[in-house]
Amino acid sequence: MAEQTVFVSIAGALIALCSVLLLVLLRTWKTVRRQRADLHSGREELKSSYDSIIAVLCAALDLRDNVTQGHAVHVSELASVVAWQMGLRKEPVRQIQKAAILHDIGKIGVADAVLSKPSALDEAEWTEMKRHPELGYRMLNGIDFLRDAAEVVYTHHERFDGAGYPRGLKGEEIPLGARIFAVVDAYDAMTSHRPYRKALPHRKVIEEIARNAGGQFDPAVVQAFLEAERRGLPEYGHPDGNGAKAPAATPVRD
């Protein structure tokens, strides 16, 4: 009888303990769930703030240079496609997209007479225009969440063979995001009409990009771009221009 009483007491204590543990677990689960919801909400608010900053910067640039309207968005889409093709994933792709959207932000500091000139730029005007990568870098590098993008903005006119600007970087000295951007920017620029030149046909542009692999462009990026092109690139309504073939290395104002 005594043993049975002890057993019942132990069983009761265990049941009570399990009940307490269950209550603790339920409260902990509810707390974790609430914290996760708060964290998700905080992340969404932060992302919204980041997107707002980028939108304001883009709007400011659009007021200065109408050519950039739509161009940056399309280049960003193309860059993300090529980045995925090269095996990059979510966060690196997001960084490249942000850089592509903001690549010409430094043009805010370029003289109006240069930005709006409908004809080819002279040497002094080109010198002024070539300041925009460094100006863009200086603008973005002070914003914590745009520092990685700032590096791509700074180097987006460098060439794989070292003949680019502003620093003459070569090969893998150039960030991968900038090497990807160089290819898709050239594609978008050459397949788009500009006030100072006509668009080139899609196939001619593809051939020109392939021909400049190892010179202007990183061969690995060109290979990924060509594979993405075979799968189908995002459309942007580029007319199939009938202009003469021009080398990809010809300076463009984008």
Image (cartoon, rainbow, N blue to C red):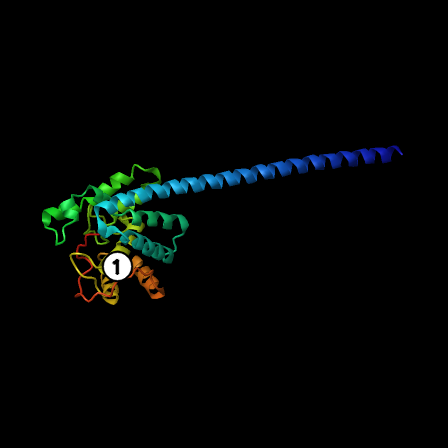
Is 141 above or below relative to 230?
above
Q: Residue furthest front?
A: 63
Asked where in the image residue 49 lies, by quadrant, the reply is: top left
Q: Residue at x 36, y 44 (%)?
A: 51
Position in image of residue 148 (x %, y %): 33, 43
Asked where in the image residue 143 lies, by quadrant, the reply is: top left
Q: Residue at x 27, y 56 (%)?
A: 183
Position in image of residue 135 (x %, y %): 22, 41
In the rendered image, is residue 195 in sight?
Answer: yes
Q: How many marks?
A: 1
Q: How crowded is the residue under tag 1: few (<14 C-alpha within 10 Å), some, or many (20+)?
A: many
Judge by depth and name the residue closer to the eye, 20 or 57.
57
Judge by depth and name the residue closer to the eye, 100 or 199.
199
Left or right of 11? Residue 239 is: left
Judge by depth and name the residue closer to the eye, 248 or 120.
120
Position in image of residue 118 (x %, y %): 14, 53
The residue that label 1 is drawn on is: 187
Position in image of residue 113 (x %, y %): 13, 46
Q: Residue furthest right?
A: 1
Q: Residue at x 21, y 65 (%)?
A: 241
Is 76 above or below relative to 19?
below
Name which residue type carries label 1.
Answer: Tyr
In the rendered image, is residue 158 in sight?
Answer: no
Is 38 above or below relative to 163?
above
Secondary structure category for the residue under label 1: helix
